Amino acid sequence: MRGIQKKAYVGLGLCMVFATACSAGGYSDENNQQYYDYGYGSPGNNYGGYSDMGAGYNSDQGSQEPFIPEIEEDFDFSQPAVIGSQIFVANETLNSVAVIDSENLAIRTIPVGFGPTMVVGPQGADTVDDSRVAVLNEGSYTVSLIEPSSDQSLYVSVMRGANSLVANRSATSFVAWYDDSLNDGDATRGDLSSISLIRGDMVYQIAVGFHVRDVFWSTQADQVVIVSDDGVSLIDITSVEDDQLSAPVAVLPQELVPLNPEDLEILVDQSGRYALARLASFSGLVVTELESGVQHVFHLPEIPTDIDFVNGDVPKAMVMLPYSKVSLVLEMSSSSLSALADIFAPEEEVVQEDVVDMGMDMAQSEDMVVVEDMMLAPDMLDLDMLIPDMLELDMGSDDMAQPEDMAMLEDMSMGADMEPVDMAQSEDMADVDSGNEVNWAAIHTREGVSVIFLPEDERLGAAVISENGKKALLYTTIAAQSRIGVLYDFDMNQQDAVYFEKGVKSVVGDEDGESFVVFHQRDESNVNDPVASSWGISVVDVRSATPRLVITEHEPWVATLWSTEGLQSRAYIIFKRPVDESFAVPSHRDVLSVNLKTFRADSFRVPSLPEGIGAIGTVGKVYVDQKHPQGRMTFVDVASDKRQTITGYQLNAGID
């Protein structure tokens, strides 16, 4: 079984996305579950991207088309620390970690530091002999490193205020850092410009750029990537022997650096080789080769509403240009980027030189006084042509006689067919897009770039891409737009339209690119339409471009997608509970199960309000963590649908 960790987009907002396309506020509970509130302006797990770009105009290209952001929200499907069949769950109240065996539901407890809030461990098959479980103790600014085989733990001190912890894939090294988006106002504020690197039993303090946005481990096993307002820091942990500075690589030319850092979105590909930067006020994109610092600036006909990396042997970037009705797929290689930057270079301005310096003092000669402001070069003047009597003539006199054929010009007005056209009011010009000036068909033939031509009557500004980089679903989160999406196959360069019954809020794809789960908006104003006024999801089969709508009573909140040999892929979804839990009804405890192959949808109810959900690949089970004073967790056997609930595991209680 492979637990699939995905991001879902409610749209882009930088904004550029469930882009801020775009993105929402989130927090983590003591079980390392990620929860998100839908809205604007929060950083997500887009490798450092801010999700709300705001609205603006494409002023640098002279277009009056408004920049409407795709509201893109990153949506994490987190799992607890799992090694084999064991689940490690933090108990902040008792300053301990409960270890639950998911096969026989046996429980044991390990003491840790004060106020444990996050638990991280290895990722499935990447478990090695040196793998450890790390527990972030926010109350004591320490991390407990647990040996799974012996339950022995080691305490190490980390930076004050650290509230986030990430592990490399094998959980042999860790980074603790302060994420200000997780601070609810009561917690201690930490250092915005440093991280604590834990390698072995040593801890190193590393200074980086200002305002750390995100930290992740690249596919290069010993490299950690830190994204900040100032750029991207790359750290090879094998070379760290003491506290040090890791200066960030700039991702923008100096002239494009915004006064407000929230106007900047930064994405870094999984290999840590390339960075994409997008601005709310710039019609273009900047690609940076992080090892060399070389920047490639692409001037585009409009502000992109979403940017994404496409995984593969050669990384690619997908750029959404809704007003141009296209999406660009750019190949990430030095040669391709240089050539493409030439294609999307800014147009050169034509500068006309003055024939004569109009500031010259023509009054130096008495005979030349009347030509003081003439538009002629001095060598073109014939002084013999000057009439002496004209030196006394008052050219501004109202008494000056006018030729008869000139008198009619004094009050002349243009006919209706000659009047200036109000471009803002012209019906013929209302739908003119700035992208019409670009020959996209010619660009599509160039090496290193593909152009996806989108439906002419649609403005699709958001995209989600499968983990394997094979498929993408392009869509819009703007409620006023129609409910069409485009399925795109990168290998075949083929697209198919898919139609939804409801407006789209977010999309997430399975690992193999065979299906997508679409989370829908609801129209609260249309109470007479049971479909429009309800929440829901659609499962999209990529091969047939067919969606299957499932109406839900409550708003889908947290989900996990997974697949395993011998069983068809599934999605398990829990629902958002009311802020005031006294208004919760029994259906808030439902868990929705959807077979991503057959489209079969079932639901079951757990004893308490769900708080988190995840997959335990080694034993073919899904866990549902629930709100309960002593802790409650339900385990679902995927093959048989058999369920077992354990209550009071924080107190070594038994099975319900």
Image: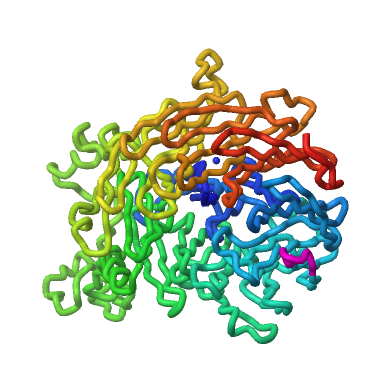
| Left or right for 644, reference 371 | right
**Magenta stretch, overall SS:** loop
Q: Is residue 144 magenta?
A: no
The residue furthest top is: 528
User: Residue visible at 15% across and 75% down?
Assistant: 381
Q: Is residue 304 above or below residue 240?
A: above
Depth check, front residue: 493 or 339: 493
250 is higher (above) or lower (below) than 303: below
- Asked whether the viewer can see residue 89, the reply is yes
Name the residue located 72 percent from the left edge and 63 percent from the top edge.
Answer: 148
Q: Is residue 15 left or right of residue 353?
A: right
Q: How many marks?
A: 0
Q: What is the quadrant of residue 557 in the picture? A: top right
- Quarter of the image for residue 405 reads top left
**Which quarter shows the C terminus?**
top right
Q: Is residue 304 left or right of residue 74?
A: left
Q: Residue at x 86, y 46 (%)?
A: 651
* Residue 42 percent coordinates (x, y): 61, 50
Residue nearest the observer in this picture, 32 or 45? 32
What colour scheme governs how the chains and residues are painted in the rendered image of this protein?
rainbow
Q: Position of residue 215 (x, y in %)?
A: 60, 65
Q: Position of residue 373 (x, y in %)?
A: 28, 68
Tell me which segment is drawn in magenta.
Answer: 147-153
Report if residue 55 is visible in the image: no
Query: Camera-side residue: 271 or 264?
Result: 271
What percent of the width, then of the height, locates residue 407? Answer: 19, 41
